[in-house]
Image (spheres, rainbow, N blue to C red):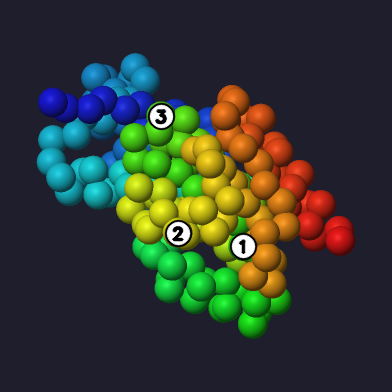
Amino acid sequence: MSEVVNLSSSLRSLNPKISALVPPYLSRQTSSLFSQPRYFKFHSFTDKICLAAERFREVDALKQDGGLQELDDSPVSVELGPICGESHFDQVMEEAQKLGESVVIVWMAAWCRKCIYLKPKLEKLAAEFYPRLRFYHVDVNAVPYRLVSRAGVTVSPTLQLWRDGQKQAEVIGGHKAHFVVNEVREMIENDSIS
């Protein structure tokens, strides 16, 4: 399948300074066929590479003119770290205590639809607080029940904030995901105030 792109007019419409970047073979009219808007039909991979290079030059020109702002390199989402057992849970708590950080633990089950739906939203929330706050998840069916009962978890999903090895706050995630995310955000912000 071939692509047709009106190169010279689309490049000029972006910025008049870019017209200087249009290669000569695209900007000059070589026959009456090109007196209409100039279309360039891709016939080869090389043509596509040339177009990509031109687009990079356009972006560079816009950056130099101040037309583009630098992108924020902070993550959009941060994967929740898995906790696989009691010893791993204790290790995470000990590490957070040494660093003086709080930890959010999401207690979930692989079969829980609300948990599955909530997880990507929590990963986005984790990115907001990255790197000063770590988020972990525990599959309640994959760890000993002793750990689940030690944390006081009776419902999935349950989200807990832990600091200094102690549970500080908890949100039961039985309602809509955006409400849960807002409650967790509020829980975190209340912890950072105290």
Element at badge 2? helix
Residue 163: x %, y % from top left? 69, 66
Which label was assigned to residue 146?
2
Q: Residue at x 25, y 49 (%)?
A: 49
Residue 62 visible in the shown view: no
Residue extending furthest toward the right: 194
Number of numbered discs visible in the structure rendering = 3
Q: Decide which of 21, 142 is in the foreground and name it.
A: 142
Q: Amino acid at mark 3?
A: Arg
Question: Of the residues tagged 3 and 2, which is closer to the observer?
Answer: 2
Q: Quadrant of the C terminus?
A: bottom right
Q: Quadrant of the N terminus?
A: top left
Q: Residue at x 67, y 59 (%)?
A: 167
Q: Amino acid at mark 1?
A: Val
Name which quarter of the figure residue 27 lies in: top left
Which label was assigned to residue 18?
none
Q: Earlier in the sequence, mark 3 or mark 2?
A: 3
Q: Residue at x 57, y 29 (%)?
A: 174
Tell me: 28 left or right of 15.
Answer: left
Q: Is residue 70 above or below residue 86?
A: above
Which residue position holds label 1? 103
Q: Earlier in the sequence, mark 3 or mark 1?
A: 1
Residue extending furthest toward the bottom: 98
Q: Amino acid at mark 2?
A: Arg
Which residue position holds label 3? 113
Residue 64: x %, y % from top left? 61, 58
